[in-house]
C-alpha cells in the first residue's frame, strides 16, 4: 500500500520505518523545512530518534499534497495540540476511500473532544481509526517486540490496519472501542506525570504501583461513564500503556513529572524535556470531563493543582493520602 505519515517526530519516524519494512511505499510529511532537510540529508532524525537509519528511497516532504494524494492510509502523528490544524490543512486532498489512522494521544481542551472526533469533524469524508498501546518509538525504531491495538468502528477497517502494521516484532490486535482506546491513551499521560512527580520526590516502587493501580481505576470510571468498554481499560491501550508511560526511561511525561517533583514548574520541565508533553495539555481537559460526567478523579485533580495552581508536590501527596476512607471498588 501507499502510506502517508503526517508528522516526523520520533513516533512518526519509527512507524515510517516499520511500514516501509512491511513492504509499503512511505512518504513522510513535516511542516518544518529544517526537519525535512535533515531527514533528506542524513536519512536519520538526529534529534528525536538518533541511530535509527532510514532507507534511501523513503520520501520526506513539506508538501501536504505529496504525502496525502493517492495514499491508501494516512497516519496522523502530529502532537495533539496540532491535530485540528493539520486536519484542516490536509482536508482538501483527502478522499472517501482513504483511511486516517490517528496515532497521537490527547484531548482537545477547547471542545473536550477526543482526537478521532476532531479529525472527523474537519474531514467528514474520511474513515478515521486509531492505533495505540505501549509502544515507545525508541524501541519500535530498532525492532523490539511490541504489541498495540487498532481501533475502528468497522471491523474491516481494523483488519486492514492490522494487516498493514503487523510484522514479526510488531503485533496488532483489533477492537471496535475507539472511544475507550482514545481516552486511555490520553489520560495515561496525566497519571504518568503524577508517577514522575513521585519519582522526583524520591519515592519508591510502592508509590508507583499505587499511582498506576488507582490511576487506571480513575480512567476506567470516566471511560465507562462516557461509553467505553470496561475491558478496554484492562488491555493494551489502558493498563498496558499506563504501565510503560509511568515506568519507562523513554517517557517524556514521566520525565517532565520527575522534574516537577524536584521543584521545577511545568513550563521549565517542558523546556528541559524538549518534546511535547501531552499530559500537560490533557490534564485540564481530563479535569473538565470528570466534572462534566460527575466522576471522581483525585489523581487528575491533584495533578492539575500542582501544574496550574501552585500546589507543591508534597502538599499534593498529602491531599491524596488524607482523603476520606473508602472501599477499593466503588462507583
Image: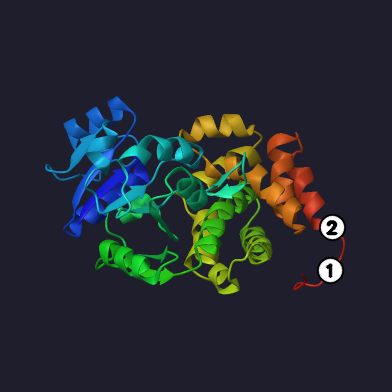
User: Closest to the observer: 266 or 97?
Assistant: 97
Q: Which mark is residue 197?
A: none
- Which numbered tag is attached to residue 323? 2
Q: Does 98 appear above or below 111?
A: below
Residue matched to label 1: 326
Q: Is residue 105 shown to the viewer in this render?
A: no
Answer with left or right where residue 1 lies relative to residue 105.
Answer: left
Q: Quadrant of residue 108?
A: top right
Report if the CB atoms under discs 1 and 2 are less than 8 Å apart: yes
Residue 148 appears anywhere in the view: yes
User: At 30% across and 49% down in the image, what residue appears?
Assistant: 14
What residue is shown at x 22% (from left), y 43% (from top)?
27
Give the distance between the C-alpha atoms of the residues marked 1 and 2, in whole angstroms. Answer: 9 Å
Quarter in which the C terminus is drawn: bottom right
x then y, percent, for residue 274: 46, 33
116 to the left or right of 18: right
Disc 2 secondary structure class: loop
* Image spot of residue 5 (x, y percent): 30, 45
Amino acid at each position: 500500500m501507499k502510506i502517508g505519515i503526517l508528522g516526523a517526530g520520533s513516533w512518526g519516524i519509527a512507524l515510517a520505518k516499520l511500514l516501509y519494512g512491511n513492504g509499503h511505499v512511505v512518504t513522510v510529511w513535516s511542516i518544518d523545512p529544517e526537519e525535512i532537510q535533515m531527514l533528506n540529508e542524513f536519512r536519520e532524525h538526529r534529534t528525536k530518534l538518533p541511530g535509527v537509519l532510514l532507507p534511501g528511497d523513503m520520501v520526506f516532504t513539506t508538501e501536504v499534497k505529496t504525502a496525502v494524494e493517492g495514499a491508501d492510509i494516512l497516519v496522523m502523528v502530529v502532537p495533539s495540540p496540532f491535530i485540528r490544524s493539520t486536519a484542516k490543512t490536509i482536508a482538501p486532498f483527502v478522499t472517501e476511500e482513504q483511511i486516517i489512522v490517528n496515532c497521537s494521544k490527547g484531548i482537545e481542551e477547547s471542545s473536550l473532544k477526543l482526537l478521532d472526533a476532531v479529525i472527523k469533524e474537519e474531514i467528514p469524508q474520511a474513515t478515521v481509526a486509531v492505533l495505540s498501546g505501549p509502544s515507545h518509538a525508541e524501541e519500535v525504531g530498532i525492532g523490539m517486540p511490541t504489541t498495540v491495538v487498532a481501533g475502528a468502528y468497522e471491523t474491516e477497517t481494523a483488519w486492514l490496519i492490522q494487516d498493514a502494521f503487523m510484522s514479526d516484532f510488531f503485533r496488532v490486535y483489533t477492537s471496535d472501542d475507539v472511544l475507550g482506546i482514545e481516552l486511555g491513551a490520553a489520560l495515561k499521560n496525566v497519571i504518568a506525570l503524577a508517577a514522575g512527580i513521585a519519582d522526583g520526590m524520591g519515592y519508591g516502587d510502592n508509590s508507583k504501583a499505587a499511582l498506576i493501580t488507582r490511576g487506571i481505576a480513575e480512567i476506567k470510571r470516566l471511560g465507562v461513564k462516557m461509553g467505553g468498554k470496561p475491558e478496554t481499560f484492562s488491555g493494551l491501550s489502558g493498563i498496558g500503556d499506563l504501565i510503560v508511560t509511568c515506568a519507562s526511561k523513554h517517557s517524556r511525561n514521566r520525565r517532565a513529572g520527575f522534574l516537577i517533583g524536584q521543584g521545577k514548574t511545568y513550563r521549565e520541565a517542558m523546556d528541559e524535556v524538549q518534546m511535547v508533553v501531552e499530559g500537560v495539555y490533557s490534564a485540564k481537559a481530563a479535569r473538565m470531563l470528570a466534572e462534566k460526567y460527575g466522576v471522581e478523579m483525585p489523581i487528575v485533580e491533584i495533578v492539575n493543582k500542582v501544574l496550574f495552581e501552585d500546589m507543591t508536590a508534597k502538599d499534593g501527596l498529602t491531599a491524596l493520602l488524607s482523603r476520606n476512607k473508602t472501599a477499593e471498588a466503588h462507583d
